[in-house]
């Protein structure tokens, strides 16, 4: 059973470009979470999605960031018009059911560098 | 707002020692608590999940305890090995209607051979 997969593992974008980060949850998991880890800071929750639905986006910046989890295919975190402050490691996690009782399994992360 | 604190921030000990990592949280109304390890430049590996109804969980040389009423958890590592060197993170549900986890800043552990 493959773990959570994320790609790309490293992404370099110039200021103003778009970044697309992909996450494939573990087999059988329909709940996906995105977190961001800024340099020298802890992990911060961004958004929680189930298939085709955003359940909780309380941690998402109000502008330029969006997430989706379509019926088919991976979950995608999109950052439009990237700025240097977006440089961070972005982690995706999945769980088999809702967040209250179930363990979250994390992917290896995508390290975004904005130049 | 739930806040998680981990003490110590860093720890360096000789191989073979038993050690304890501490985690405290401000809101005791949690469903569970999860311990992770993170190796440099890598993702998070889940070590143990303790449900709110449990007092401890064990996996190999690791033992995690939970005292909800006092807002504390400890991770005990027995007979430490150089391969245990990593950053150890404690996480609890955000609460307040939010669905994600909130993390401590971690304990950076170095086991000297």
Image (spheres, coloured by chain):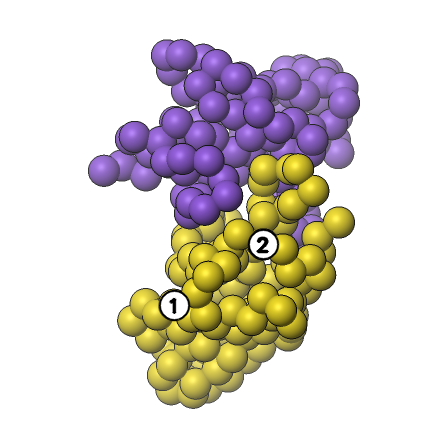
Chain colours: A purple, B yellow
The answer to whether B67 is drawn above or below residue B2 in the figure is below
The answer to whether B34 is drawn above or below residue A57 in the figure is below
Can you tell which quarter of the image residue B90 is in?
bottom right
- Where is residue B39 shown, x and y percent of the image? 47, 57
The answer to whether A21 is drawn above or below residue B58 in the figure is above
- Where is residue A111 shown, x and y percent of the image? 55, 36
- Where is residue B84 shown, x and y percent of the image? 41, 70
Q: In this rendering, do the residues under marks 2 and 1 share a single chain?
A: yes
Residue position marked by numbered label 1 in the rendering: B57
Q: Secondary structure at mark 1?
A: strand
Chain of the residue under label 2: B
Residue B30 image label: 2
Pick the residue in front: A31 or B21: A31
Chain of the residue under label 1: B
* Spatial separation of the CA atoms under disc 2 and disc 1: 16 Å
| Number of numbered tags placed on the structure image | 2
Q: Give the residue displayed 67% in from the left and 21% down from the top.
A: A65
Pick the residue in front: B31 or A109: B31
Furthest residue to the left? A1
Residue B13 image label: none
Q: Which part of the image, by quadrant, shows the C terminus of chain B? A: bottom left
Q: Residues within 10 Å of mark 2 (few under 14, many from 20)?
A: some
């Amino acid at each position: 059973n493959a773990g959570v997969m994320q790609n790309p593992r490293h992404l370099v974008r110039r200021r103003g470009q778009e970044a697309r980060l992909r996450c494939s949850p573990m087999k059988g998991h329909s709940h996906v979470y995105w977190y961001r880890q800024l340099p020298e800071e802890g992990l911060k929750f961004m958004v929680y999605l189930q298939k085709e639905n955003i359940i909780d986006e309380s941690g998402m910046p109000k502008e330029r960031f969006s997430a989706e989890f379509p019926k088919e295919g991976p979950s995608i975190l999109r950052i439009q018009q990237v700025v240097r402050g977006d440089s961070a490691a972005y982690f995706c996690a999945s769980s088999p059911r809702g967040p209250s009782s179930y363990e979250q399994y994390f992917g290896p992360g995508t390290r975004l560098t904005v130049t | 707002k739930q806040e998680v604190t981990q003490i110590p921030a860093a720890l360096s000990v000789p191989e073979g020692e038993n050690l304890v990592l501490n985690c405290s949280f401000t809101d005791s109304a949690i469903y569970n608590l999860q311990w992770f390890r993170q190796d440099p430049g890598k993702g998070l590996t889940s070590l143990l999940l303790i449900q709110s109804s449990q007092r401890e969980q064990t996996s190999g040389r690791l033992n995690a305890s939970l005292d909800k009423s006092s807002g504390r958890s400890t991770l005990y590592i027995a007979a430490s090995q150089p391969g245990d060197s990593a950053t150890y993170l404690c996480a609890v549900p955000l609460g307040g209607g939010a669905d994600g986890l909130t993390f401590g800043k971690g304990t950076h552990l170095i086991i000297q051979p």
